Amino acid sequence: MCLAVPAKIVDKQDMLATIELSGVTRQVSLMLLPNAVQGEWVLVHAGFAIQLIDEAEALKTLDLFRELKLYEEA
């Protein structure tokens, strides 16, 4: 199963974006989303930003991930 994770773009240089997720930053390719800009939310899979999403949907998804983790720990 493949999973794409929502993350916020905190910096962009050419076709590379620095994204932030749960306090961790990583660089991902923007080759599939060349018009993405700092401050936007993207779905990230295998080192690539693959889709733009709105902030509400990103935060809802992250909340669901946290909820799943609570069930896993129980």
Image: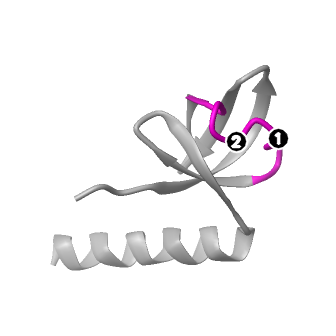
Residue at 44% x, 55% y is 4
Magenta span has 35? yes
Residue 23: where, in percent of width, then height? 57, 44
Is the C-beta separation of discs 1 and 2 under 8 Å?
yes
Residue at 69% x, 30% y is 17
Q: Secondary structure at mark 1?
A: loop
Residue 44: where, in percent of width, then height? 52, 47
Residue that lies at the very extreme toward the front in this rendered image: 32
Residue at 61% x, 68% y is 58
Q: Nearer the viewer, residue 33 or 64?
A: 33
Residue type, numbered disc 1: Asn
| Quadrant assignment, res 30 | top right
Q: Secondary structure at mark 2?
A: loop
Residue 73: where, in percent of width, then height? 18, 70
48 horizontally vs 64: left or right: right
Residue at the spot of label 2: 33
Q: Is residue 52 above or below residue 66?
A: above
The structure's colour scheme is one colour
Residue type, numbered disc 2: Leu
Residue 35 has which mark? 1
Specify the principal SS of the magenta part.
loop
Instruction: Quarter of the image for the N terminus: give it.
Output: bottom left
Q: Nearer the viewer, residue 22 or 43?
A: 43
Residue at 73% x, 68% y is 55
Residues in magenta, as a range? 28-40
Q: Is residue 35 above or below residue 52?
A: above
| Quadrant assignment, res 67 | bottom left
Magenta span has 57? no
Question: So how many labels did they put on this image?
Answer: 2
Q: Nearer the viewer, residue 17 or 30?
A: 30
